[in-house]
Amino acid sequence: MPGQATSPGYGVRTHAVAGAPLLCDAREQGLTGDGTTNDQPALAALVDRLGDAFAADGRARVIYCPPGVYAIRDAGTVWRSGVSLTGAGPGATRFILSNEGDRSTPVPLAFHTAQLHGASPDRNLAYCTFADFEIDGSGVASAEYNPLSKGLGLQYVTGGLFRNLFIHHTAATGFGCDFLQDTLVQAIRVLECGRMDNGLEMGGAGIGIGIGGWGPVERLTIANCIAVGNATNGIFLEMQHTDRPQPRGIRIMGCHTEGNRFGISDWGADGLIVTGCTMTANLEAGFQVSAKGTTGVPGEGGLLTDCVIDGNLRDGVSIGNTRGPYTVRGNRITGNGRYGYHHQDLGDTGQGPAEEIVLESNDIWGNSLDGIRFDRPLRDTVVINNRIRNNGRQCAPAAEGSGESVRYSQNTVVDRQAAWPADGHRGKIVRVGHRYAVVAANDANTLTLAPLRPGGTSGWSADTPLPGTPYELPAAPDGRAGITVNADADSVTIRGNLIRDSGSGTQTYGIWITERGSCVNCRVVENDLDGNATAIQTDTPGVGGYWSGNHGND
């Protein structure tokens, strides 16, 4: 059947090939684990020997690395089918990657790629488990960014299991494996990977998985993983081919992404399911759907459900370039530095309106600007039964200060004479001379700054300002709505939503149709708009449709 991955066609022999045990203690096979000896040659030789044995008798082998520090220098190991690598757990079994002998050579622990090794659906890696060890990539460096400087870089894996790994400080993506069929990625922690990625390179993620190599279905589950402080995405999927079907069958469940550029991104899947995840304090967006990947193929048909998407520096959920459909249901989307949900026009796609976007039963409150904002044309979108309240927190007027009351640190601005509303400057850019920083939060007299890049220690674009140096904060935007339509909306339904300002005085409009927006044949009915300064503001009058039963729109 299409997309079906098959096991190697080997007959399994009753007895293993002589001299190739089914379970190998790495210390008994030439590896030392002393932190000084280069264990890569011994590991590569062992993988080849066991891979040859699997090809001969069809019986998978396991390499067990006892507690120790295994130095892997100046070369990665080309992996083989039927060979698994296990340890005694992160912190106990550690692989330390480095390339001080040849800075031009990337050093993944294990790799198997189409470009270098001929990997393909017919030459895949089968029966491979990687579990219970740590990969430290801090010793790998090069003059230029190299996307192969990963922790693991395997392509075309079938029946794989990746479990209980700690991968950190790699120059490129930590877990960068592509085309994973019938595979489980579970309980992997990735920390501050993509060290050498300036934000514009390929990869640089915690967990980055290329998709589209197996046909219309890729059966992959990513579960209970943690991604913190990685240069681009915490977890992302990227379509690798423009002439192949976008795959279904991928799930991301119970994961935590924090302090990355993007938390979780869908750059090309069909029907991705993201459920029960936490996405917080990411610098661009908690969850993103776009065509930012190398092939320019956006995700479509996905479901984002039952997640907490809180405190991201710009948008909670950012969707752009997809033709739809996409469903966002039952999530908490709160405290983000710009919009709760933002449907963006990212340009350069030549696509028409996004169709059949569904926003249902989400809890959207306390975001700095609009709760929901549409900046791209929509058709047949449904916004129903959401609780949208007390957004527009970026309400503080312009401010400036200098002199004895003003002090700076790497991640704060303190003005003892200020009396700012809580989070009234969140999401703004504070400027001090030629320097700038982005405000992540504020209280009455302290601005807390977001790091300039994931994993960074300073929020400033240059050196930390001297005490007393003048600062400037811009004014808040005049319009901050529960729902803003800033593009053409055709046959959109907005029904049964609670769109309130319950005393904060920050949400200026319940529903706002801007001068750039329009509503044609829309149904705006039975919404509770109590407490907003203006319930419904139509800078462009609606054409056709139904507008009735909206409480508070007197």
Image (tube, grey):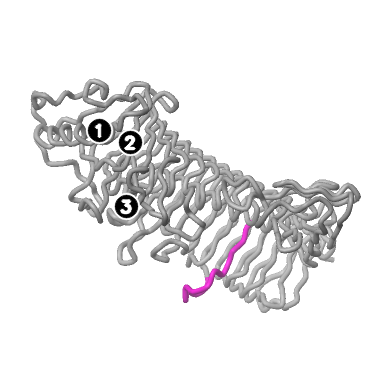
- Mark 2 and mark 3 residues within 8 Å of each other at the beta carbon: no
Secondary structure type for disc 2:
strand
Q: Which residues are magenta?
A: 341-353
Residue bearing mark 1: 43
Asked if marks 1 and 2 touch (Cβ < 8 Å), the reply is yes
Q: Give amino acid for label 3.
A: Val
State the CA–CA distance, disc 2 to disc 3: 36 Å
Q: Residue furthest right?
A: 417
Q: Amino acid at mark 2?
A: Ile
Q: Which mark is residue 72?
A: 2
Mark 3 in CB contact with mark 1 (< 8 angstroms): no
SS for tag 1?
helix
Q: Quadrant of residue 20?
A: top left
Q: Which residue is mark 3?
A: 217
Residue type at mark 1 is Leu
* Residue shown at the point (16%, 41%) measured from the top left: 8
Quarter of the view holding residue 53: top left
